[in-house]
Amino acid sequence: MIGVFDSGSGGMSVYRELVKLLPEARYVYYADNAHCPYGEKTAAYIRRRARAITCTLLEKGCGIIVVACNTATAAAIRYLRGTFPDVPFIGMEPAVKPAALGTKTGVIGVLATAGTLKGSKYLTTKGKYEDDVRIEEHVGEGFVELVEAGDFDSPHAEAVVRRSVEPLLDAGADTIVLGCTHYPFLAGMVRKVAGPDVQVIDPAPAVARQTLAVMQEHGIPTVDPEPGIDLLSSGDPASLERVYALVRKQQHPQ
Ligand code: DGL
C-alpha cells in the first residue's frame, strides 16, 4: 500500500502520475487541509504534521510514503527518514535540471511556496545551475487557495495566476517549473497566460518513476488484491473529493 500526503489536494497531481505507472496498487491519500496552506508555516510545525500523518499512514498499512508536497519535503523529509528509518520516503524534486537543460533564452522561472524556495534542497539544486542560467522565482500567491476551492479557470483564477506568472515572463523566462504540487491543476491557466512558446514543467511524472524504482528495490508489492484509493482529510473532505473527481475524469474521459 502506498501512502501519499500533502497539505491538501495538490498531491493528487502526483497520485495522477503514480496511478499511471502503478494502476494495480492500493493508495491511501491524506490531505492535511485543516492545516493548509503549509507555505507560510514554520519548518517545525510542518515536521510535527508530517510525523502525525506518517503515523496514520503506517497504521493503515502503508509500506512506502510519497511526500507529495514540495513544502513538506523541504521542511521534513530528512526528519522523517531519521524518525522512521525502516520506511522508504519519496520526496518532491524541484525540476530545475530539466528546465535548465531545455531553456533557449537562458532564463527559467520557478513557481513555488515561500517554504520551498527557502529550503536547502532547492537552494542546493539552484546553486548547481545558476552559473549557466538565470533563475527567476515567484511564489504562486493564492494558487493553493484556488485549487482547494476548485477554481481552475474563472476570470478570478486567471487574474491570480497572471500576477505571479507575468513577472517571470517579463524577466525573459521561456520555461516555468511548477514547484508546488497544487500548481499543475492550474497548468492550463499558466499556459494560457504564458502562451504557447513557454514550456511548463510538472515534476510529478519523474517522482512517480522514482516511486516505482524504490518499490522494486525494496521488494514492496506493486500489485494489491484490492487496488484503489482511500481518501482521508483532516478538514472538510469536499475539496479532496472534488480534485479526485477531476483526476478520475482525466483518467477515464467519457
Ligand atoms: N502542495 C504543497 C507544495 O507542494 C503545499 C502548498 C501549501 O500548502 O502551501 O508545496
Image (cartoon, grey):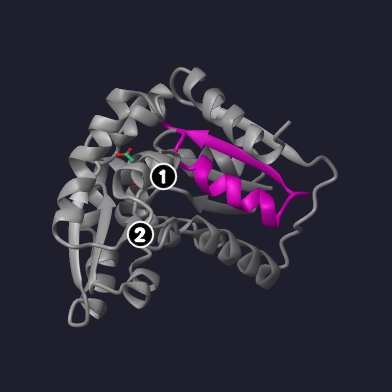
Can you say whether 18 is above or below 125 in the image?
Answer: above
Q: Which residue is denoted by mark 2 in the rendering?
A: 197
Q: Which amino acid, by three-letter code, is at mark 2? A: Asp
Q: Is residue 16 left or right of residue 20?
A: left
- Give how far apart the Cα atoms at labels 2 and 1 are: 14 Å
Q: Position of residue 87 (x, y in %)?
A: 56, 58
Q: Position of residue 93 (x, y in %)?
A: 40, 63
Image disc number at residue 187: 1
151 or 11, which lies in front?
151
Quarter of the image for the C terminus: give it.
top right
Q: Which amino acid, by three-letter code, is at mark 1? A: Ala
Can you say whether 203 is above or below 59 in the image?
Answer: below
Q: Is residue 64 left or right of residue 152?
A: right
Q: Is residue 183 left or right of residue 238?
A: left
- Write the start and end of the magenta stretch as one range: 9-32
148 or 221, which lies in front?
148
Q: Residue at x 47, y 33 (%)?
A: 31
